[in-house]
Each structure stands twice: as structure tokens, then as C-alpha cells.
Amino acid sequence: MLVAVAVVPQTPLLVPEIAAGAAGELEPLRAAAIEAVREAAGVADRVMVVAPGPGKEAYDSVVADFSAFGYECLDTGASDVRPGSALPLGEWLLSAAGVTLPRTFRETTGTAIDLGGHVRTALLVLADGTAKREESAPGHVDVRSLAFDAVIGTALAGVDLDALASLDPALADALWASGAPAFRALAATVRADAAEGWAARLRYDGAPYGVAYWVAVWSRKDVWSRPA
């Protein structure tokens, strides 16, 4: 049973040691992401961490290892997920939020996530928007980015499953919107479990360094707090 969703960026820059000189500038984004994870997990009995990627395996544990990105500043040990996966960031966020619930990690190409049973589950979705919002962005600038990202931001604020499910994979690739598969998987998973009865809070909508990031929390309206 899906009871809550937290959507956060998949960038390792959320980790202060990695952000280094930009850590202060990114603090509002980091704080919003950690609080969203804490809020979503607070009504659940376990967490499913989802990130875009080709991996088909599910992991019961993932180490917050960022060496694949060239960062070895954190002595965390090595993870067995594919190099470059965003899943280790999910573990870091859960730890930063003080979440100790059982968790499962998996990547998705855009299909629904099998939640596996009736356990109250919070979905932690790691996903970015386009990386072509300005000349200084990783992919430089593409005028189509603003409209593409606006669709995602509006959908996250209003639980618009149709809009997320309809994100064009080819256009997403062209705009370097690497999180599109995770957004489509989010829509498919919510639709399969409980398409209606959700409340949304968009905590962050911005594009530092030309990359679109959001932090959002979706909660089932009938599940606002853990039963006594």
C-alpha cells in the first residue's frame, strides 16, 4: 500500500562535502529534500527508493558511495549498484533524515514499481528535470526546457499523473532531463495503487546552475499520521 511519495533531486550536490563551496547556496534545497524524506517516511513502515536507470535488480541495502562520481571524500565503503546510479544518494538522504525503516532500492526505465504486498510504503523518487536552462548549464541552453520543466512542476504540485506519464522520452533525452523515466514510473505506480485521493505540497521549484530540481511530497488524504 502506497501511503506517501517524496520527490527529490538526484544530484550528489545535495551532499555538503561534495557541494563544497556551493554547499551554503544549496542549503535551502538540501533542507527541503531532507524534510520531504522525513515527512513521507513518517507515515510509512518501509521506504522504496527509486531512481532512473536500466538496473533490474532490487537491493535491500545500498551504501552511500559516491566514488563513481569522482568523489572519495566520504568514507562510506563501496556499493554494489551500477556506477553512476543515483540510488546511493537515496541512502544518504534517508540517513540525513534519521529514517531507520526497512528500505528497498531499485532503478526504473519508466514502468510501474511493484510495491510487493500490503505494507505501508513511502516512495522516494530521485529525479531531475532538464539540464539546459541557461548557457552555464551542463547542456547549455535549449528554449524548450522551460516548457518541459513547467509541465513537471505543475504535475508535481497537482498530482497530475497523466502529465507525468506523457513525458516524451525523446524530448527528455534531447533536453538532458535524466529524471523523466522516474517521473513516468511514479505516475504508473500511483495509478496502479491508488490513482485518487492525494494531497500535494511542492516544497522547492528552482534551477540552480541551469538544472531543474523539485522537492515535493504527496500524501494520501486518508493517511496523515501513523496510527497509535
Image: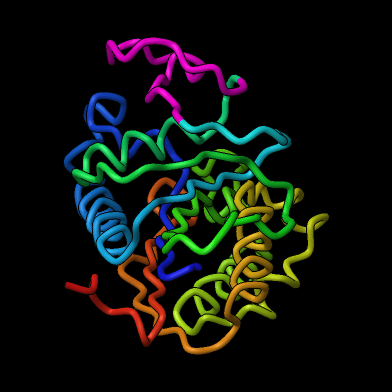
Residue at the spot 63% in from the left edge and 44% down from the top edge: 52
Vertical order, 19 against 100 (above or below) = above
Q: Which quarter of the figure has residue 129?
A: bottom right
Foreground residue among 211 and 32: 32
Tell me the magenta residue range.
61-82
Q: Is residue 14 left or right of residue 59?
A: left
Quadrant that contains the C terminus: bottom left
Let me know if residue 80 is in the magenta part. Answer: yes
Let me know if residue 193 is in the magenta part. Answer: no
Residue at the spot 72% in from the left edge and 36% down from the top edge: 56
Magenta: main secondary structure: loop
**How many tags in the picture?**
0
The chosen color scheme is: rainbow
Residue at the spot 56% in from the left edge and 44% down from the top edge: 51
Mark yes or no: residue 104 visible.
yes
Q: Is residue 137 left or right of residue 8?
A: right
Vertical order, 210 against 42 (above or below) = above
